[in-house]
Image (tube, rainbow, N blue to C red):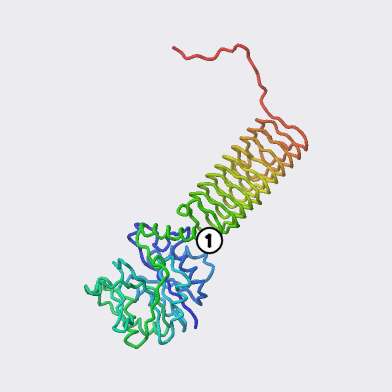
Amino acid sequence: MSLDVVILAAGQGTRMRSRLPKVLHELAGKPMVRHVIDTASGLDADRIHVVIGHGGEMVREALADCNRPLHFAVQAEQMGTGHAVAQALDGLGQGKVLVLYGDVPLIRRATLEALLAQVDEKHMGLLTVTLDDPGGYGRIVRDEGGQAVAIVEQKDASPEQLLIKECNTGIMAMTASQLKRWLPQLSADNAQGEYYLTDIIAMAAAEGITISTSQPARAMEVEGVNNRQQMACLERAHQRDMAEYLMTQGVALADPERIDVRGSLTCGHDVHIDVGCVFEGDVELGEGVRIGPYCIVRSSRIGAESVIDAHSVVDGAVLAGFNHVGPFARLRPGSRLAVRARVGNFVETKNAEVGEGTKINHLSYIGDARLGRDVNIGAGTITCNYDGANKHRTEIGDEAFIGSNSALVAPVSVGKGATVGAGSTISRDVADHSLAVSRSRQIGKDNWPRPTKDD
């Protein structure tokens, strides 16, 4: 049977106290609704429908770069979950329908696959969860034979029903024909004055349809977000899961509670990650890589046996291996380090190729440049790559030596084996194996009296 997934994402989320639609708040660097869409995509859904309402255009824009087509339905008035699903009704196929929520980001594909496996024309699937404190949740009502026959929302529940600990997650699956038959029968005659999707459970039971229930492996999978506290709780739960996974892959974490992965992180054997590190985008760490405390690594590939010392930022860079970076270094997009190149403390590189064995150890800026192998860059060196309108390149040949506090005014080249004296401003090309010095002449005056303060 074909599969349609309907994701409800129309809520305002007033308790978030934000101008941003609730489903666009980020968990692990990605909007919550994107997590749900990615999970749905993993089910090989034929169509994914996103029901939008509050801030709908913002949601559309945020999902414009999705890697698969989405079908949007608009819920202009917030009249309950049943009303929200009804907005997508005309776009459904003839197979199964799965209803998910854009603010329940941690639901797992395996949980949904088990739910969908129960669905046919004589069965619908309902995901439930048993909670020690079921406050706020709808309760699952079962008959004497143990079959689920209804869901009662907390505001409509009797004192006896409030004692039930099996709760509705809101996630359910059925055939399209069942849903199209039941939705038009919904009524808003309840405490909230809304059309509850949960009322279709009683309709199914009345028709003799079996409500097949299943539960997630962990309750955290089905927790939704209504406020900042819950958002933070789910963020930490997700990060703990990521940490557990990394450790099963052989990664050594100094403290599993203090790592943030906001994208994908692939690691070779014997990688060590210290505390407080953040990984964003697609990051690859080769074998034996060591990441010092409080580093940020974004969309980069770091080769084997490299060391990134404390408080460094590696962003859009490629390191070939056996590199040493930091502490307090910043590699900006386009930085490429050959084997055994070193970038030290308070050094910034941007769109720079740094050759094998080359060292930039202290307090320098290297931008829009290509450095050969075994180049030495002295402290305080800058490539002056911007003239106020355009960027220009600096070329430095193999084994060149750039003295401290030098300014290389691009476009300019320094030849192979050339030497630039400390404190020089170089604005013309330097030939191979030559010396270039550009300084003001030093003068000296013996027994010179220092100025004194006036009385």
Q: Does 307 sit above or below residue 133?
A: above
- The residue under the point 37% across, 74% down is 128
| Neighbourhood count class around disc 1 (C-alpha, 10 Å): few under 14, some 14–19, many 20 upward | few
Indicate the position of residue 445 as horizontal and vertical percent values: 63, 14
Left or right of 89 in this view: 247: right
Q: From what the image shows, is residue 445 above or below residue 433?
A: above
Q: Quadrant of residue 225?
A: bottom left
35 vs 406, nearest the viewer: 35
Instruction: Identify residue for label 1.
Output: 248
- Percent position of residue 5, x then y: 45, 75
Residue 164 at x, y = what percent? 28, 73
Q: In which quarter of the image is residue 168?
A: bottom left
Q: Nearer the viewer, residue 87 or 377?
A: 377
Labels in figure, total = 1
Of the residues shown, which amino acid type is indicated by label 1?
Thr
Q: Which of the pair 28/290 is nearer the observer?
A: 290
Residue 101 point in image, percent of width and height: 40, 69
Please tell me whether residue 205 is drawn above or below residue 20 in the rendered image: below
